Amino acid sequence: MNTILNISCYKFVALPDAAHLRQPCLDQALARQLKGTLLIAEEGINFFLAGSAEDVRGFVDWLRQDPRLADLNPKESWSATQPFRKMLVKVKREIIRMNHPSIRPAQGRAPAVTAATAKRWLDQGHDDEGRPVVTLDTRNQFEIDHGTFENTLHWGLTKFTEFPDAVLAHKDALQDKTVISFCTGGIRCEKAAIFMRNAGLEHVYQLEGGILKYFEEVGDAHYQGGCFVFDEREALAPDLSATK
């Protein structure tokens, strides 16, 4: 019986007091017997947590008391067992490392497409202006090996910091196409899509909510395999159940 609620969530928002938020977040999570990882940086917050539904949602409600985090909207899935071994709260320089400090999603994000729009474009093979559509997987190769969109473009990355150089090396092949960038839950594409637009690629969109939101809203259309997740479940099927 699936009684453990798993959530993933991020928000890019200015948190200049990030270092001072660590201990209260840890105390609140431990008081609710949650396990997982929560990252805090001056650019925002990113977390993967699991526990009872009451405790997980209670923790999110506590975070929302901070006006800067009032609109947190976690993605939920369920499991029969706790997929994390401990509770970690870390203060980092970036909540998703890219090593390009000028890329600041909190100051304005790239355009996004919903799962329904992405599916429709893939169904018809072009966007609403007739431009060819390609999906671009911004994840690392070991994640892609678990599953990805059919005929997707990827560059065999071993870490996200390699992404900017890969874009510059391949951007000419993308100039006349509409690019849908995607990742697990959307966080990497917040930076990836901005970087690509800044590099001169005009028709770049991020998949809103990433693969997990796509699974939730349209299932496995145009997708093969599962979606790697960073916990002991290893990967999720399109119905958001653990594949392991």
Image (spheres, rainbow, N blue to C red):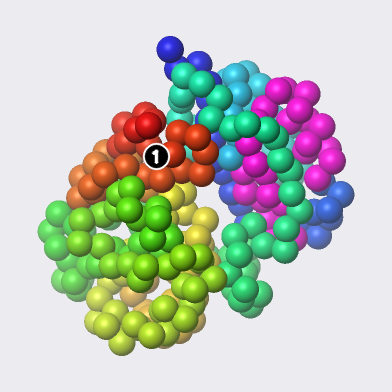
Look at the image and say whether residue 37 sits in the magenta stretch.
yes
Q: Is residue 14 visible?
A: no
What secondary structure is found at the residue carrying circle 1? strand
- x 45%, y 33%: residue: 233
- x 67%, y 62%: residue: 94
Q: Is residue 114 above or below residue 243?
A: below
Nearest the viewer among 151 and 230 is 230
Nearest the viewer among 36 and 85 is 85
Nearest the viewer among 115 and 95 is 95
Residue 134 in the image: state x and y as whole percent. 25, 67
The outermost residue toward the left is 124
Can you tell which quarter of the image residue 16 is in? Answer: bottom right
Residue 192 in the image: state x and y as whole percent. 47, 68
Q: Is residue 37 above or below residue 151?
A: above
Q: Is residue 5 above or below residue 238?
A: above
Q: Amino acid at mark 1?
A: Ala
- Which region is colored magenta? 22-47
Which residue, given by chain and number where applicable, does mark 1 sit on?
235
Nearest the viewer among 72 and 92 is 92
- x 78%, y 38%: residue: 25
